[in-house]
Amino acid sequence: MRTRGLLFAVAAAAALSVPAVAAAEPPPPPPPPPAPNIGGYALVKPSEYAVNDGSMYAFTAGAGITCVLSRTNGSYGCSGVFPGAPGGANVVSGGQVGAPGFATAANAVYAGDKPALPLPANSRISFQHVTCGTDGALVTCQNSFDQSGFVVGPGGSWIVNPTNPLLDRPEGRNPYFN
């Protein structure tokens, strides 16, 4: 009888402790939504957006967002007010390789020798592996080299594919046969 009581007490303690451990860890946040498909947007003539003696293409979009694509080193980015960006970031930038990242700057970081022209809704601009486009509200920039990029807009801002799916994949997953 004593063994049965001890066994019951141990089983009850184990049953009560398992939910407590599971409840202590919050569920992981949901993944960000996929980036809009900007590949179907009309391609603008990049030379019309050239600034700084043609070393950059610059455009504005959305509410006060300025973006550039560098022709010298292939970097790209945007600055402005980004709702939902981590830490109140107002700059997002990336390069030809690797995922972009958010940062905070005290002043505007993207300025040219003349004002940037607005990129029309449902249009895109490209240079090398980078394409940026807007639907009139969201700005999306994507790097086709490693399938990363970012989205900024009034509904939120996020990094697209922060890790290269061809290099960083779960065990047992083949990127060519998902």
Image (cartoon, rainbow, N blue to C red):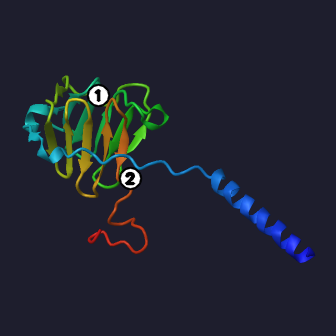
Q: Position of residue 129 (x, y in %)?
A: 20, 52
The circle on residue 162 is 2
The circle on residue 127 is none
Disc 1 target residue: 65
Give the quarter of the figure containing the C terminus. Answer: bottom left
Image point (12%, 45%), residue name: 40
Crowd around label 1: few <14 · some 14–19 · many ≥20 (10 Å): many
Quadrant in the rendering for residue 45: top left
Q: Position of residue 30 (x, y in %)?
A: 44, 48
Outermost right residue = 2
Give SS at disc 2: loop
Q: Is residue 51 left or right of residue 91?
A: left
Crowd around label 2: few <14 · some 14–19 · many ≥20 (10 Å): some
Give SS at disc 1: strand
Q: Amino acid at mark 1?
A: Ile
Q: Position of residue 152 (x, y in %)?
A: 32, 36
